[in-house]
Image (cartoon, coloured by chain):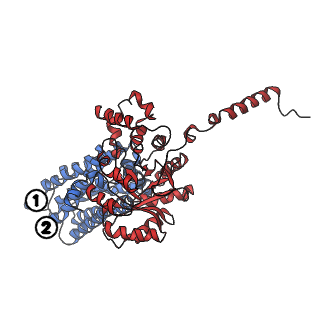
Amino acid sequence: MTDWFSRRQFLISAGLAGLALTSPLLFANASKAPSSSPIMRRIPGTDESIPAIGMGTWITFNVGGDEQLVAQRTEVLKTFFELGGTVVDGTPMYGSAADVMGEALDALDAHDRIFAATKIWTGDESETRQEAARSSRRWGIDRFDLLQVHNLLGWQGHLETLKQMKAEGKVRYIGITTSHGRRHREFARIMEREPLDFVQLTYNVLDREVEDRLLPLAEERGIGVIVNRPFRGGSLFRRFQSEPLPDWAGEAGVGNWAEFFLKYIISHPAVTCAIPATSKVGHMKENMGALYGKLPDADLRQRMVDYVRSL
Amino acid sequence: MSGADWLSYSLQDFVMFGPQVFLRLFVRINQDLWPWQVLAVVVAIGIPVLLFRPRQEARRLAVGLMAVAWAASGYGFLVGYFGPIYWPAAWFGWAFVAQGGLLAAAMFFGGVHGYRLPSDRFVVLWLIAVCGLPWWAVAESGQWQAVALFGVAPGTTAAAGALVVALMTGPWRWFYLPVTVLWSLFSAAIFWVLQTWWLLVTPLAALLLLGAGFWLSPRPEQNLD
Protein backbone atom coordinates (compact mmCIF):
# COMPACT_ATOMS: atom_id res chain seq x y z
CA MET A 1 0.00 0.00 0.00
CA THR A 2 1.29 3.43 -0.94
CA ASP A 3 2.20 5.80 1.87
CA TRP A 4 0.11 8.96 1.12
CA PHE A 5 1.75 10.96 3.90
CA SER A 6 4.96 10.56 5.75
CA ARG A 7 4.82 11.36 9.45
CA ARG A 8 6.66 14.63 8.85
CA GLN A 9 4.29 15.64 6.04
CA PHE A 10 1.31 14.82 8.22
CA LEU A 11 2.56 16.96 11.08
CA ILE A 12 3.38 19.91 8.82
CA SER A 13 -0.01 19.70 7.07
CA ALA A 14 -1.89 19.43 10.35
CA GLY A 15 0.01 22.39 11.74
CA LEU A 16 -0.70 24.54 8.70
CA ALA A 17 -4.37 23.52 8.72
CA GLY A 18 -4.69 24.48 12.37
CA LEU A 19 -2.97 27.78 11.74
CA ALA A 20 -5.26 28.50 8.80
CA LEU A 21 -8.36 27.73 10.84
CA THR A 22 -7.36 29.96 13.69
CA SER A 23 -5.98 32.79 11.54
CA PRO A 24 -7.95 32.97 8.32
CA LEU A 25 -6.45 36.33 7.31
CA LEU A 26 -2.94 34.83 7.38
CA PHE A 27 -3.55 33.23 4.00
CA ALA A 28 -5.64 36.01 2.50
CA ASN A 29 -4.43 39.03 0.62
CA ALA A 30 -4.51 41.57 3.41
CA SER A 31 -5.46 44.37 1.05
CA LYS A 32 -8.51 42.45 -0.10
CA ALA A 33 -9.62 41.29 3.31
CA PRO A 34 -10.20 44.29 5.56
CA SER A 35 -10.49 43.39 9.21
CA SER A 36 -13.83 45.12 9.78
CA SER A 37 -17.08 45.81 8.01
CA PRO A 38 -17.24 48.65 5.53
CA ILE A 39 -18.76 51.91 6.71
CA MET A 40 -22.18 52.05 5.07
CA ARG A 41 -24.54 55.00 4.93
CA ARG A 42 -28.28 54.85 4.53
CA ILE A 43 -29.77 56.88 1.70
CA PRO A 44 -32.21 59.16 3.55
CA GLY A 45 -35.86 58.12 3.23
CA THR A 46 -34.98 54.61 2.04
CA ASP A 47 -33.81 51.28 3.41
CA GLU A 48 -30.89 51.23 0.99
CA SER A 49 -27.33 51.72 2.18
CA ILE A 50 -24.24 52.55 0.14
CA PRO A 51 -20.53 52.48 1.05
CA ALA A 52 -19.31 55.82 2.43
CA ILE A 53 -16.40 55.90 0.00
CA GLY A 54 -17.16 55.99 -3.70
CA MET A 55 -15.14 56.94 -6.72
CA GLY A 56 -15.03 59.95 -9.04
CA THR A 57 -13.79 59.82 -12.61
CA TRP A 58 -12.73 63.45 -13.07
CA ILE A 59 -9.64 63.50 -15.32
CA THR A 60 -8.57 60.01 -14.27
CA PHE A 61 -10.71 57.94 -16.67
CA ASN A 62 -10.32 60.27 -19.65
CA VAL A 63 -7.64 58.24 -21.43
CA GLY A 64 -9.07 58.10 -24.97
CA GLY A 65 -8.28 55.02 -27.01
CA ASP A 66 -5.09 54.20 -25.11
CA GLU A 67 -5.47 50.45 -24.56
CA GLN A 68 -2.64 50.32 -22.04
CA LEU A 69 -4.22 53.02 -19.88
CA VAL A 70 -7.73 51.58 -20.29
CA ALA A 71 -6.41 48.28 -18.91
CA GLN A 72 -4.70 50.11 -16.06
CA ARG A 73 -7.87 52.05 -15.17
CA THR A 74 -9.80 48.79 -15.29
CA GLU A 75 -7.44 47.52 -12.58
CA VAL A 76 -8.22 50.63 -10.52
CA LEU A 77 -11.95 49.92 -10.83
CA LYS A 78 -11.41 46.24 -10.01
CA THR A 79 -9.53 47.20 -6.85
CA PHE A 80 -12.36 49.56 -5.92
CA PHE A 81 -14.92 46.77 -6.20
CA GLU A 82 -12.72 44.26 -4.36
CA LEU A 83 -12.38 46.65 -1.45
CA GLY A 84 -16.11 47.12 -1.11
CA GLY A 85 -16.85 50.16 -3.30
CA THR A 86 -19.98 50.53 -5.40
CA VAL A 87 -20.69 54.24 -6.01
CA VAL A 88 -19.08 55.59 -9.20
CA ASP A 89 -19.77 59.14 -10.28
CA GLY A 90 -19.10 60.41 -13.79
CA THR A 91 -20.05 63.21 -16.11
CA PRO A 92 -20.50 63.48 -19.86
CA MET A 93 -18.01 66.33 -20.12
CA TYR A 94 -14.85 64.43 -19.21
CA GLY A 95 -13.95 63.55 -22.81
CA SER A 96 -13.74 59.79 -23.15
CA ALA A 97 -14.20 58.97 -19.44
CA ALA A 98 -17.73 57.58 -19.89
CA ASP A 99 -16.61 55.29 -22.74
CA VAL A 100 -13.63 54.09 -20.73
CA MET A 101 -15.91 53.38 -17.77
CA GLY A 102 -18.12 51.33 -20.10
CA GLU A 103 -15.11 49.36 -21.34
CA ALA A 104 -13.91 48.74 -17.79
CA LEU A 105 -17.36 47.57 -16.65
CA ASP A 106 -17.54 45.23 -19.65
CA ALA A 107 -14.09 43.83 -18.90
CA LEU A 108 -14.99 43.20 -15.26
CA ASP A 109 -18.56 42.13 -16.04
CA ALA A 110 -19.51 44.44 -13.19
CA HIS A 111 -22.62 46.23 -14.46
CA ASP A 112 -24.69 44.81 -11.61
CA ARG A 113 -22.13 45.71 -8.90
CA ILE A 114 -22.16 49.42 -9.47
CA PHE A 115 -24.22 52.27 -8.08
CA ALA A 116 -23.97 54.39 -11.22
CA ALA A 117 -24.22 58.15 -10.98
CA THR A 118 -23.71 60.75 -13.65
CA LYS A 119 -24.68 64.29 -14.47
CA ILE A 120 -26.86 66.16 -16.90
CA TRP A 121 -24.74 68.99 -18.22
CA THR A 122 -26.30 70.94 -21.05
CA GLY A 123 -27.90 74.35 -21.30
CA ASP A 124 -30.67 72.90 -23.49
CA GLU A 125 -33.35 71.98 -20.94
CA SER A 126 -35.17 69.78 -23.45
CA GLU A 127 -32.12 67.48 -23.80
CA THR A 128 -32.36 65.74 -20.41
CA ARG A 129 -33.60 62.35 -21.60
CA GLN A 130 -31.34 62.29 -24.64
CA GLU A 131 -28.24 63.10 -22.57
CA ALA A 132 -29.15 60.46 -19.99
CA ALA A 133 -29.67 57.91 -22.79
CA ARG A 134 -26.33 58.79 -24.39
CA SER A 135 -24.55 58.36 -21.06
CA SER A 136 -26.31 55.02 -20.46
CA ARG A 137 -25.10 53.75 -23.82
CA ARG A 138 -21.55 54.89 -23.13
CA TRP A 139 -21.48 53.20 -19.70
CA GLY A 140 -23.23 50.12 -21.12
CA ILE A 141 -25.96 50.13 -18.46
CA ASP A 142 -29.75 50.07 -18.72
CA ARG A 143 -30.30 53.01 -16.40
CA PHE A 144 -28.50 55.15 -13.89
CA ASP A 145 -29.09 54.88 -10.17
CA LEU A 146 -28.59 58.62 -9.81
CA LEU A 147 -28.87 61.50 -12.28
CA GLN A 148 -27.80 64.96 -11.16
CA VAL A 149 -28.17 68.39 -12.75
CA HIS A 150 -24.58 69.56 -12.96
CA ASN A 151 -23.63 72.96 -11.55
CA LEU A 152 -27.29 74.02 -11.74
CA LEU A 153 -27.01 74.48 -15.52
CA GLY A 154 -30.59 74.66 -16.81
CA TRP A 155 -31.75 73.12 -13.56
CA GLN A 156 -35.46 74.02 -13.73
CA GLY A 157 -36.16 72.17 -16.97
CA HIS A 158 -33.80 69.28 -16.25
CA LEU A 159 -35.15 68.71 -12.75
CA GLU A 160 -38.76 68.58 -13.95
CA THR A 161 -37.80 65.93 -16.52
CA LEU A 162 -35.76 64.01 -13.95
CA LYS A 163 -38.79 63.92 -11.63
CA GLN A 164 -40.85 62.44 -14.45
CA MET A 165 -38.10 59.93 -15.25
CA LYS A 166 -37.99 58.87 -11.60
CA ALA A 167 -41.78 58.42 -11.56
CA GLU A 168 -41.47 56.28 -14.71
CA GLY A 169 -38.73 54.15 -13.10
CA LYS A 170 -36.09 55.32 -15.57
CA VAL A 171 -33.82 56.53 -12.79
CA ARG A 172 -33.84 55.65 -9.09
CA TYR A 173 -32.60 58.87 -7.53
CA ILE A 174 -32.24 62.46 -8.66
CA GLY A 175 -30.18 65.38 -7.47
CA ILE A 176 -28.19 68.51 -8.19
CA THR A 177 -24.49 69.32 -7.98
CA THR A 178 -22.18 72.19 -7.35
CA SER A 179 -18.44 72.37 -6.90
CA HIS A 180 -15.75 74.80 -5.74
CA GLY A 181 -18.32 76.51 -3.48
CA ARG A 182 -20.32 78.00 -6.36
CA ARG A 183 -23.90 79.34 -6.07
CA HIS A 184 -24.54 78.04 -2.58
CA ARG A 185 -27.46 80.40 -1.92
CA GLU A 186 -29.37 79.27 -4.99
CA PHE A 187 -28.36 75.70 -4.20
CA ALA A 188 -29.89 76.01 -0.71
CA ARG A 189 -33.11 77.49 -2.11
CA ILE A 190 -33.48 74.50 -4.44
CA MET A 191 -32.79 72.11 -1.56
CA GLU A 192 -35.54 73.80 0.45
CA ARG A 193 -38.16 73.53 -2.30
CA GLU A 194 -37.45 70.51 -4.47
CA PRO A 195 -37.85 66.79 -3.69
CA LEU A 196 -34.17 65.87 -4.08
CA ASP A 197 -32.66 62.51 -3.16
CA PHE A 198 -29.05 63.70 -3.35
CA VAL A 199 -26.95 66.80 -3.55
CA GLN A 200 -23.31 66.80 -4.56
CA LEU A 201 -21.01 69.51 -3.27
CA THR A 202 -17.41 70.30 -2.45
CA TYR A 203 -16.28 69.63 1.10
CA ASN A 204 -12.89 68.91 2.60
CA VAL A 205 -10.81 69.74 5.64
CA LEU A 206 -10.01 73.19 4.22
CA ASP A 207 -13.21 74.01 2.29
CA ARG A 208 -15.77 73.87 5.11
CA GLU A 209 -18.30 76.51 4.14
CA VAL A 210 -20.99 73.85 3.61
CA GLU A 211 -20.89 72.98 7.33
CA ASP A 212 -22.71 76.24 8.07
CA ARG A 213 -25.80 75.86 5.89
CA LEU A 214 -25.89 73.14 3.23
CA LEU A 215 -24.99 70.10 5.35
CA PRO A 216 -27.44 70.93 8.17
CA LEU A 217 -30.09 71.65 5.55
CA ALA A 218 -29.48 68.28 3.90
CA GLU A 219 -29.93 66.54 7.26
CA GLU A 220 -33.08 68.50 7.98
CA ARG A 221 -34.58 67.80 4.55
CA GLY A 222 -33.50 64.13 4.40
CA ILE A 223 -31.25 64.58 1.38
CA GLY A 224 -28.21 62.40 0.78
CA VAL A 225 -24.88 64.19 0.34
CA ILE A 226 -22.13 63.18 -2.08
CA VAL A 227 -18.86 65.02 -1.58
CA ASN A 228 -16.65 65.93 -4.53
CA ARG A 229 -13.08 67.29 -4.50
CA PRO A 230 -12.28 65.62 -1.13
CA PHE A 231 -8.57 66.17 -1.82
CA ARG A 232 -9.08 69.59 -3.43
CA GLY A 233 -8.01 68.23 -6.79
CA GLY A 234 -4.90 66.66 -5.21
CA SER A 235 -3.61 69.91 -3.74
CA LEU A 236 -4.11 68.67 -0.16
CA PHE A 237 -1.54 65.95 -0.80
CA ARG A 238 0.87 68.37 -2.43
CA ARG A 239 0.57 70.65 0.59
CA PHE A 240 0.51 68.18 3.50
CA GLN A 241 1.93 64.82 2.42
CA SER A 242 5.45 65.73 3.51
CA GLU A 243 4.15 66.52 7.00
CA PRO A 244 3.78 63.86 9.71
CA LEU A 245 0.36 62.66 10.79
CA PRO A 246 -0.54 63.78 14.30
CA ASP A 247 0.31 61.47 17.21
CA TRP A 248 -3.38 60.90 17.88
CA ALA A 249 -4.18 59.84 14.27
CA GLY A 250 -4.79 56.26 15.42
CA GLU A 251 -7.60 57.45 17.70
CA ALA A 252 -9.36 58.80 14.59
CA GLY A 253 -8.84 55.50 12.75
CA VAL A 254 -6.35 57.17 10.42
CA GLY A 255 -3.21 55.51 9.05
CA ASN A 256 -2.28 57.82 6.17
CA TRP A 257 -3.18 61.23 4.75
CA ALA A 258 -5.82 59.85 2.35
CA GLU A 259 -7.66 58.35 5.32
CA PHE A 260 -7.17 61.58 7.26
CA PHE A 261 -8.84 63.70 4.57
CA LEU A 262 -11.59 61.18 3.78
CA LYS A 263 -12.49 60.23 7.34
CA TYR A 264 -12.82 63.89 8.21
CA ILE A 265 -15.48 64.15 5.49
CA ILE A 266 -17.46 60.96 6.02
CA SER A 267 -17.55 61.41 9.78
CA HIS A 268 -19.87 64.37 9.30
CA PRO A 269 -23.34 63.00 10.07
CA ALA A 270 -24.92 64.59 6.97
CA VAL A 271 -22.46 63.06 4.51
CA THR A 272 -23.51 59.93 2.66
CA CYS A 273 -20.50 59.34 0.46
CA ALA A 274 -17.20 60.92 -0.66
CA ILE A 275 -15.97 60.34 -4.19
CA PRO A 276 -12.18 60.67 -4.51
CA ALA A 277 -10.70 60.10 -7.97
CA THR A 278 -7.44 58.35 -8.70
CA SER A 279 -5.62 56.72 -11.59
CA LYS A 280 -3.41 54.48 -9.45
CA VAL A 281 -4.21 51.15 -7.83
CA GLY A 282 -2.04 52.01 -4.82
CA HIS A 283 -3.90 55.24 -4.22
CA MET A 284 -7.24 53.47 -4.61
CA LYS A 285 -6.18 51.07 -1.83
CA GLU A 286 -5.29 54.02 0.38
CA ASN A 287 -8.60 55.73 -0.37
CA MET A 288 -10.58 52.59 0.35
CA GLY A 289 -8.80 52.23 3.68
CA ALA A 290 -11.05 55.06 4.84
CA LEU A 291 -14.05 52.78 4.33
CA TYR A 292 -12.99 50.68 7.31
CA GLY A 293 -12.22 51.11 10.98
CA LYS A 294 -13.00 53.87 13.41
CA LEU A 295 -14.26 57.31 12.54
CA PRO A 296 -13.29 60.48 14.42
CA ASP A 297 -15.85 61.92 16.83
CA ALA A 298 -16.72 65.63 16.98
CA ASP A 299 -13.78 66.42 19.26
CA LEU A 300 -11.28 64.63 17.03
CA ARG A 301 -12.75 66.27 13.93
CA GLN A 302 -12.01 69.67 15.44
CA ARG A 303 -8.49 68.54 16.28
CA MET A 304 -8.05 67.46 12.64
CA VAL A 305 -9.00 70.93 11.43
CA ASP A 306 -6.74 72.59 14.01
CA TYR A 307 -3.84 70.32 13.12
CA VAL A 308 -4.06 71.03 9.39
CA ARG A 309 -4.31 74.76 10.09
CA SER A 310 -1.21 74.59 12.26
CA LEU A 311 0.94 73.11 9.50
CA MET B 1 -23.85 81.31 -15.69
CA SER B 2 -23.06 84.71 -14.24
CA GLY B 3 -19.76 86.53 -14.60
CA ALA B 4 -18.95 85.73 -10.98
CA ASP B 5 -19.47 82.02 -11.71
CA TRP B 6 -17.08 82.16 -14.62
CA LEU B 7 -14.51 83.96 -12.46
CA SER B 8 -14.70 81.13 -9.94
CA TYR B 9 -13.27 78.73 -12.55
CA SER B 10 -9.53 78.33 -12.90
CA LEU B 11 -7.57 77.31 -15.96
CA GLN B 12 -7.22 73.87 -14.39
CA ASP B 13 -10.99 73.33 -14.55
CA PHE B 14 -10.83 73.37 -18.35
CA VAL B 15 -8.07 70.79 -18.72
CA MET B 16 -9.74 67.43 -18.15
CA PHE B 17 -6.86 65.04 -18.65
CA GLY B 18 -3.61 64.33 -16.89
CA PRO B 19 0.05 64.63 -18.01
CA GLN B 20 0.46 60.86 -18.27
CA VAL B 21 -2.39 60.61 -20.78
CA PHE B 22 -1.10 63.57 -22.78
CA LEU B 23 2.49 62.33 -23.01
CA ARG B 24 1.25 58.89 -24.01
CA LEU B 25 -0.30 60.51 -27.12
CA PHE B 26 3.22 61.05 -28.54
CA VAL B 27 4.22 57.47 -27.76
CA ARG B 28 1.02 56.05 -29.25
CA ILE B 29 1.14 57.99 -32.52
CA ASN B 30 4.80 57.07 -33.01
CA GLN B 31 4.06 53.40 -32.37
CA ASP B 32 1.12 53.46 -34.76
CA LEU B 33 2.99 55.35 -37.51
CA TRP B 34 6.22 53.39 -37.45
CA PRO B 35 8.21 53.39 -39.76
CA TRP B 36 6.67 56.34 -41.62
CA GLN B 37 8.33 58.82 -39.21
CA VAL B 38 11.51 58.26 -41.20
CA LEU B 39 9.80 59.98 -44.12
CA ALA B 40 8.83 62.88 -41.84
CA VAL B 41 12.49 63.29 -40.81
CA VAL B 42 13.63 63.21 -44.46
CA VAL B 43 11.02 65.87 -45.34
CA ALA B 44 12.05 68.03 -42.37
CA ILE B 45 15.71 67.94 -43.43
CA GLY B 46 14.87 68.23 -47.11
CA ILE B 47 12.77 71.39 -46.88
CA PRO B 48 15.67 73.87 -46.45
CA VAL B 49 17.60 72.08 -49.20
CA LEU B 50 14.66 72.66 -51.58
CA LEU B 51 14.13 76.22 -50.39
CA PHE B 52 17.58 77.33 -51.43
CA ARG B 53 17.67 75.70 -54.83
CA PRO B 54 17.75 78.35 -57.57
CA ARG B 55 14.58 77.15 -59.28
CA GLN B 56 11.31 78.61 -58.09
CA GLU B 57 9.60 75.19 -58.43
CA ALA B 58 11.83 73.79 -55.71
CA ARG B 59 10.75 76.54 -53.34
CA ARG B 60 7.12 75.80 -54.16
CA LEU B 61 7.67 72.12 -53.47
CA ALA B 62 9.18 73.01 -50.08
CA VAL B 63 6.15 75.13 -49.22
CA GLY B 64 3.88 72.31 -50.42
CA LEU B 65 5.63 69.88 -48.09
CA MET B 66 5.13 72.30 -45.20
CA ALA B 67 1.45 72.48 -46.09
CA VAL B 68 1.25 68.68 -45.92
CA ALA B 69 3.07 68.72 -42.56
CA TRP B 70 0.54 71.17 -41.07
CA ALA B 71 -2.41 69.13 -42.32
CA ALA B 72 -0.89 65.77 -41.30
CA SER B 73 -0.06 66.82 -37.74
CA GLY B 74 -3.45 68.52 -37.38
CA TYR B 75 -5.54 65.65 -38.66
CA GLY B 76 -3.31 62.88 -37.31
CA PHE B 77 -2.30 64.04 -33.86
CA LEU B 78 -4.91 66.64 -32.94
CA VAL B 79 -8.08 65.21 -34.50
CA GLY B 80 -7.16 61.54 -34.28
CA TYR B 81 -5.40 61.26 -30.92
CA PHE B 82 -5.83 64.40 -28.85
CA GLY B 83 -9.44 65.19 -29.86
CA PRO B 84 -11.03 62.14 -28.18
CA ILE B 85 -9.83 63.27 -24.75
CA TYR B 86 -10.20 67.02 -25.31
CA TRP B 87 -12.59 68.41 -27.88
CA PRO B 88 -10.91 71.85 -28.30
CA ALA B 89 -7.86 69.99 -29.61
CA ALA B 90 -9.96 68.59 -32.46
CA TRP B 91 -10.96 72.14 -33.40
CA PHE B 92 -7.31 73.09 -33.49
CA GLY B 93 -6.69 70.02 -35.61
CA TRP B 94 -9.06 71.31 -38.27
CA ALA B 95 -7.44 74.75 -37.98
CA PHE B 96 -4.08 73.08 -38.73
CA VAL B 97 -5.63 71.42 -41.79
CA ALA B 98 -6.92 74.85 -42.88
CA GLN B 99 -3.45 76.29 -42.29
CA GLY B 100 -2.06 73.65 -44.64
CA GLY B 101 -4.74 74.63 -47.15
CA LEU B 102 -3.75 78.28 -46.79
CA LEU B 103 -0.11 77.46 -47.49
CA ALA B 104 -1.11 75.43 -50.54
CA ALA B 105 -3.24 78.32 -51.79
CA ALA B 106 -0.35 80.74 -51.19
CA MET B 107 1.85 78.48 -53.27
CA PHE B 108 -0.51 78.59 -56.24
CA PHE B 109 -1.84 82.12 -56.01
CA GLY B 110 1.20 84.29 -55.49
CA GLY B 111 1.42 84.14 -51.72
CA VAL B 112 5.04 82.90 -51.83
CA HIS B 113 7.55 85.50 -52.95
CA GLY B 114 10.64 84.92 -55.05
CA TYR B 115 13.05 87.00 -53.01
CA ARG B 116 16.33 85.58 -51.80
CA LEU B 117 16.47 84.67 -48.09
CA PRO B 118 19.50 84.82 -45.79
CA SER B 119 20.01 81.09 -46.10
CA ASP B 120 22.50 80.53 -43.29
CA ARG B 121 20.30 82.07 -40.59
CA PHE B 122 17.13 80.44 -41.92
CA VAL B 123 18.73 76.99 -42.08
CA VAL B 124 20.19 77.25 -38.58
CA LEU B 125 16.83 78.27 -37.10
CA TRP B 126 14.99 75.62 -39.09
CA LEU B 127 17.35 72.87 -37.95
CA ILE B 128 17.10 74.04 -34.35
CA ALA B 129 13.32 73.70 -34.64
CA VAL B 130 13.06 70.33 -36.38
CA CYS B 131 16.05 68.68 -34.70
CA GLY B 132 15.98 70.28 -31.24
CA LEU B 133 12.35 70.72 -30.29
CA PRO B 134 11.30 67.05 -30.72
CA TRP B 135 13.40 66.05 -27.70
CA TRP B 136 11.58 68.13 -25.10
CA ALA B 137 8.72 65.61 -25.08
CA VAL B 138 11.33 62.92 -24.51
CA ALA B 139 12.82 64.92 -21.64
CA GLU B 140 9.38 65.35 -20.09
CA SER B 141 8.18 61.77 -20.47
CA GLY B 142 11.47 59.93 -20.06
CA GLN B 143 10.59 57.82 -23.11
CA TRP B 144 12.40 58.27 -26.41
CA GLN B 145 9.30 56.93 -28.19
CA ALA B 146 7.64 60.24 -27.28
CA VAL B 147 9.86 62.17 -29.72
CA ALA B 148 7.72 64.97 -31.19
CA LEU B 149 8.66 65.02 -34.87
CA PHE B 150 7.94 67.71 -37.46
CA GLY B 151 4.90 66.71 -39.51
CA VAL B 152 3.67 64.41 -36.73
CA ALA B 153 3.56 66.51 -33.55
CA PRO B 154 1.68 69.82 -33.81
CA GLY B 155 4.02 71.81 -31.57
CA THR B 156 7.20 71.12 -33.55
CA THR B 157 5.31 71.58 -36.82
CA ALA B 158 3.88 74.93 -35.75
CA ALA B 159 7.26 76.13 -34.42
CA ALA B 160 9.21 75.24 -37.57
CA GLY B 161 6.26 76.36 -39.69
CA ALA B 162 6.38 79.78 -38.02
CA LEU B 163 9.53 80.52 -40.01
CA VAL B 164 7.47 80.27 -43.19
CA VAL B 165 6.25 83.85 -42.76
CA ALA B 166 9.66 84.79 -44.15
CA LEU B 167 8.55 83.28 -47.47
CA MET B 168 5.12 84.85 -47.69
CA THR B 169 3.95 88.05 -49.28
CA GLY B 170 2.20 90.87 -47.40
CA PRO B 171 -1.45 89.92 -46.85
CA TRP B 172 -0.84 86.15 -46.86
CA ARG B 173 1.46 86.32 -43.87
CA TRP B 174 -1.24 88.00 -41.78
CA PHE B 175 -3.69 85.20 -42.60
CA TYR B 176 -0.98 82.77 -41.58
CA LEU B 177 -0.40 84.26 -38.13
CA PRO B 178 -3.52 83.46 -36.07
CA VAL B 179 -3.28 79.65 -36.00
CA THR B 180 0.39 79.76 -35.03
CA VAL B 181 -0.15 82.34 -32.30
CA LEU B 182 -3.36 80.83 -30.91
CA TRP B 183 -1.93 77.31 -30.88
CA SER B 184 1.18 78.52 -29.07
CA LEU B 185 -0.86 80.26 -26.38
CA PHE B 186 -3.34 77.37 -26.08
CA SER B 187 -0.67 74.70 -25.81
CA ALA B 188 1.38 76.80 -23.39
CA ALA B 189 -1.67 77.15 -21.13
CA ILE B 190 -2.20 73.37 -21.19
CA PHE B 191 1.44 72.62 -20.41
CA TRP B 192 1.31 75.13 -17.57
CA VAL B 193 -1.73 73.42 -16.03
CA LEU B 194 -0.24 69.96 -16.53
CA GLN B 195 3.03 71.23 -15.04
CA THR B 196 4.95 69.69 -17.94
CA TRP B 197 7.55 72.42 -17.84
CA TRP B 198 9.89 71.05 -20.52
CA LEU B 199 7.07 71.11 -23.06
CA LEU B 200 6.68 74.87 -22.58
CA VAL B 201 9.86 75.33 -24.61
CA THR B 202 8.06 74.46 -27.85
CA PRO B 203 5.28 77.11 -27.87
CA LEU B 204 7.75 79.72 -26.63
CA ALA B 205 10.08 78.73 -29.47
CA ALA B 206 7.19 78.98 -31.95
CA LEU B 207 6.52 82.59 -30.95
CA LEU B 208 10.22 83.46 -31.14
CA LEU B 209 10.55 81.78 -34.53
CA LEU B 210 7.55 83.71 -35.75
CA GLY B 211 9.39 86.91 -34.88
CA ALA B 212 12.49 85.51 -36.55
CA GLY B 213 10.45 84.81 -39.67
CA PHE B 214 9.56 88.48 -39.93
CA TRP B 215 13.17 89.42 -39.21
CA LEU B 216 14.37 87.15 -42.04
CA SER B 217 11.87 88.53 -44.54
CA PRO B 218 13.94 89.87 -47.42
CA ARG B 219 13.95 93.38 -48.81
CA PRO B 220 12.46 93.82 -52.30
CA GLU B 221 15.92 94.37 -53.83
CA GLN B 222 16.82 90.75 -52.88
CA ASN B 223 14.47 89.33 -55.52
CA LEU B 224 15.51 85.83 -56.56
CA ASP B 225 14.36 86.45 -60.11
**Within the image, what quadrant is residue B105 found in?**
bottom left
Viewer-proximal residue among B115 and B12: B12
Count the marks: how many?
2
Viewer-proximal residue among A218 and A209: A218
The residue sitting at 37% across, 44% down in the picture is: B141
Which residue is under mark 1? B222
Viewer-proximal residue among A287 and A264: A264
The residue carrying pointer 2 sits among few (fewer than 14), some (14 to 19) or many (20 or more) residues within 10 Å by Cα, namely few
Which residue is under mark 2? B171
Q: Is residue A289 above or below residue A95?
A: above
Relative to B92, A133 lies left or right: right
Q: Tell me the element at label 2.
A: helix
Q: Residue furthest front?
A: A220
Sequence-wise, the earlier of marks 2 and 1 is: 2
Colour-to-chain, red: A
The residue sitting at 28% across, 51% down in the picture is: A181
**Within the image, what quadrant is residue B184 found in?**
bottom left
Disc 1 sits on a residue from what chain? Answer: B
Colour-to-chain, blue: B
The residue sitting at 38% across, 70% down in the picture is: A128
Amino acid type, mark 1: Gln
Amino acid type, mark 2: Pro
